Amino acid sequence: MSSATEPLPGTSDCWEPEVLDWIELETAAREIFHRYGYAEVRTPIFERTEVFVRSLGDETDVVQKEMYTFTDRGGRSLTLRPEGTAGVIRAVADRGLEQGEEARVFYFGPMFRGERPAAGRRRQFHQVGVEAVGNDSPWMDAECIAMLSHFLDQIGVTGGKIKINSRGLPEDRPQVSAALAEYFTPHAPGMCEDCQRRLTTNIWRMLDCKNPACQEVAAGAPDLVSLMGDDTRAFFARVCQSLDSLGVDYEVAPRLVRGLDYYIHTVFEITHPGLGAQDALAGGGRYRIVLPGAKKPVEGIGFAAGMERLLLARASLGRQTTAVAEADIAIISLGENAILPGLRLAQELRATLSGLRVKADFTGRSLKAQMRGANRSGARLALIRGDNELAENVVLCRDMTTSEQQSVPAADLMAWIDERRTTLFA
RNA sequence: GUGGCUGUAGCUCAGUUGGUUAGAGCGUCUGGUUGUGGCCCAGAAGGUCGCCGGUUCAAUUCCGGUCAGUCACCCCA
């Protein structure tokens, strides 16, 4: 409403208790990925523009129309990261990998794409991702997908569907594209405008058009993997066999195409019915990236999951966010003389009774008003002092649950609370 | 970037077939005798009816534009 204070389109402010869901998600991600021997990495939120252009591919939609790119004071073109992989690969390359050395890392943080917001799609969104860099093993792909599945189970996002496919190697693509062109060209007049355009611009995309008529045509398209080379087919077969052996539930999706150019071999995606039109929870695959100035490409496997979407999917399963009280102990000071002693008492409590949340009221309002505030804060114990208590050197302790209260000598207060700690703040 | 729907108090929404002081519930604040919360009762505060322009004697109500939200397309997490 008040546009001056509203966050920009596609961005939002996040408050407790939602913040607690995010922390829980991050904690679960750390716990799971550490279990697989991955280490957390934090890379910058902006990079030189070429890092993304070179990695994602200059023809991709992300690069062509979705990046937040700006020129800095030194005249360099910089870009707010639209995804996590490119920056992580740059960081791994910068640190250097010995021959045969692997880097297994995970990350989370904000990503930026200048798209029109929709359900589950924001301009600033957040991803949790992993990258296993410096390997070319199909078993690594299988473990990566299994790890993603494990992570989803752990955070309570059930009901997702894992779809996998192979994009083959660059050398496999000309023959696949040719076969697609041969198949689609005669059907093109009956397909949507987008697909007629894709016939020349991005023929692979014709496979996953959502237009019903196009889907019907695409359903009869040749099997891509069967058109690829022996090694590619063997690689993909190994990935599938490994997943079978691990008991991971997945399906091969011959028409799964992903939008970034760096993918080779295995690509995968997890969709979830609780999400709406943007139904991808997570996506990833094997990639080969050539960084600006690098001689050799870096190969790895990874995925990224949209954190907003993970939370949406979990909410769609009926998972409630648990509201946490603001405070365990409320300190109420009546009259000006009591305010500074109240401030000091709060500090003493925080120092002595670690883990308890203490909120002091310095408004000088009526007892009634301060009690109302204490109640609203969820505090289980109210510590009240006015001139009378100060004169007698006691603190009036009120149990907000039972409404019982008693005067406790100030000198005994810490011990008094500590004794009741488990019953009061269970 | 394109299209559909929406835009009235902090929140959820009524309402005016265009006509003086725009309503409810929830929330907030104060009070219901001296210093006691949650329930109840009473009262109060709080709105340029998103913004700009047009039509009209008169617009929050009609029209246009714009901004924002939302959903969908494109694409992706």
Image: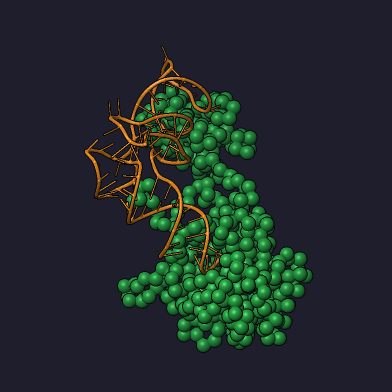
Chain colours: A green, B orange
- Of the 4 image quadrants, the one containing the C terminus of chain A is top right
Task: Please provide percent x and percent y for residue A205.
Answer: 56, 74
Q: Is residue A332 left or right of residue A26?
A: left
Q: Residue at x 43, y 26 (%)?
A: A367
Q: Is residue A68 left or right of residue A198?
A: left
In the figure, A301 relative to A282: above or below? Answer: below
Q: Nearer the viewer, residue A160 or A24?
A: A160
Task: Please provide percent x and percent y for residue A292.
Answer: 47, 82
Q: Residue at x 67, y 78 (%)?
A: A222
Q: Nearer the viewer, residue A216 or A125?
A: A216
Residue A141 appears in which quarter of the rendering? bottom right
Residue A220 appears in which quarter of the rendering? bottom right
Q: Residue at x 41, y 68 (%)?
A: A68
Task: Please provide percent x and percent y for residue A259.
Answer: 54, 73
Q: Nearer the viewer, residue B70 or A293?
A: B70
Task: Please provide percent x and percent y for residue A159.
Answer: 68, 57
Tell me, yes or no, if residue A101 can be seen here.
Answer: no
In the figure, A297 relative to A219: above or below? Answer: below
Q: Is residue A33 left or right of residue B53?
A: right
| Count of numbered marks | 0
Which residue in the rendered view is the most extreme toward the right? A245
Q: Residue at x 45, y 61 (%)?
A: A116
